[in-house]
């Protein structure tokens, strides 16, 4: 069983600079190897495997020293994301080659993996590889399970977030009642049970769209 915990984070200027460098390096790696794969396919109808790209990345980091600044697993995950996108292209799940990532995209993210306890939740701070300890908003929140990875993102409004993916969570215990209940999903009421218990529709999408419209208006001013 896995669960994700998402927090807003507040990097200082040094940390914010490194986060932006990491976003840029991840975008560069994705686009660089997407270009390599497209050219290989157009010229020889062949593809370049993830392992081949990974070996080339090692050499590329020697040539471009600035690629050593961000967390190394963020670059590997960029290759994995590209590999997944390219496999979808070959399996024809999506038409056309994967798209290049644009600098103009105002949503940015990268994923890093837990290795040797390099990701730690400290209540009011989260420790991330190469970034260090970043302040969080939800200082009273507790997480359960073992951390697998962290995805750091920046929204178009400029806010930073981190999502921790955790596993080995304790399984909830269910009390056996030997009773059955039917569920009917609706629009006005989210769920109505066979014994006429109604659960209201939380309307998360509408609330999110309203909030998004408000933020976009603020950003355009």
Image (cartoon, rainbow, N blue to C red):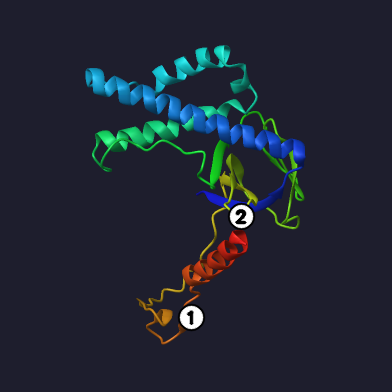
Q: Is residue 128 visible?
A: no
Distance (Cα) linking label 2 and label 1: 31 Å
x then y, percent, for residue 56:
45, 15
Q: Which residue is mark 1?
A: 200
Determine which of the numbered discs, if any, sits on residue 48 in the image. none
Q: How many marks?
A: 2
Q: What secondary structure is found at the residue carrying circle 2?
A: loop
Along the horizontal axis of the image, is 1 left or right of 152?
Answer: left
Give the residue drawn at x 75%, y 58%.
140
x then y, percent, for residue 35:
38, 25
Please rate how many residues cluster around mark 2, counting C-alpha atoms within 10 Å: few if below 14, some from 14 to 19, many from 20: few
x then y, percent, for residue 92:
23, 39
Camera-near label (2 vs 1) is 2
Q: Nearer the viewer, residue 177 or 4?
A: 4
Q: Quadrant of the C terminus?
A: bottom right
Give the residue drawn at x 51%, y 33%.
27
Along the horizontal axis of the image, is 172 left or right of 81?
Answer: right
Q: Residue 151 is drawn in which quadrant? A: top right
x then y, percent, for residue 215:
59, 63
Q: Nearer the viewer, residue 177 or 24?
A: 24
Q: Earlier in the sequence, mark 2 or mark 1?
A: 2
From the viewer's perspective, is residue 214 above or below residue 200? Answer: above
Give the residue drawn at x 51%, y 65%.
174
Q: Residue 187 is drawn in which quadrant? A: bottom left
Please rate how many residues cluster around mark 1, counting C-alpha atoms within 10 Å: few if below 14, some from 14 to 19, many from 20: few
Q: What secondary structure is found at the residue carrying circle 1?
A: strand
Q: Residue 108 is drawn in which quadrant? A: top right
From the viewer's perspective, is residue 51 above or below residue 163? Answer: above
Q: Which residue is mark 2?
A: 157
From the viewer's perspective, is residue 107 above or below residue 83? Answer: below
Give the residue drawn at x 58%, y 65%.
217
Q: Is residue 25 visible?
A: yes
């Amino acid at each position: 069983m896995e669960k994700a915990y998402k927090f807003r984070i507040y990097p200082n200027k040094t940390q914010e600079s490194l986060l932006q460098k990491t976003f840029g390096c991840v975008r560069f790696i994705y686009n660089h190897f997407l270009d390599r794969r497209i050219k290989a396919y157009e010229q020889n109808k062949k593809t370049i495997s993830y392992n081949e790209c990974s070996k080339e990345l090692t050499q590329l980091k020697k040539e471009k020293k600035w690629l050593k600044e961000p967390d190394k697993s963020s670059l590997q995950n960029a290759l994995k994301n590209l590999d997944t996108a390219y496999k979808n292209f070959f399996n024809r799940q999506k038409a056309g080659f994967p798209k290049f990532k644009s600098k103009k995209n105002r949503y940015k993210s990268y994923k890093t993996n837990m290795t040797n306890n390099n990701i730690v939740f400290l209540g009011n701070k989260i420790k991330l590889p190469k970034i260090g300890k970043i302040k969080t908003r939800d200082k009273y929140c507790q997480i359960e399970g073992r951390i697998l990875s962290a995805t750091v993102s920046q929204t178009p409004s400029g806010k930073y977030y981190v999502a921790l993916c955790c596993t080995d969570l304790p399984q909830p215990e269910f009390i056996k009642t030997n009773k059955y209940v039917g569920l009917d999903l609706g629009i006005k009421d989210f769920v109505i049970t066979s014994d006429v218990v109604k659960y209201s529709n939380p309307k998360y999408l509408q609330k999110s769209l309203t909030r998004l419209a408000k933020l976009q208006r603020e950003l355009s001013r």
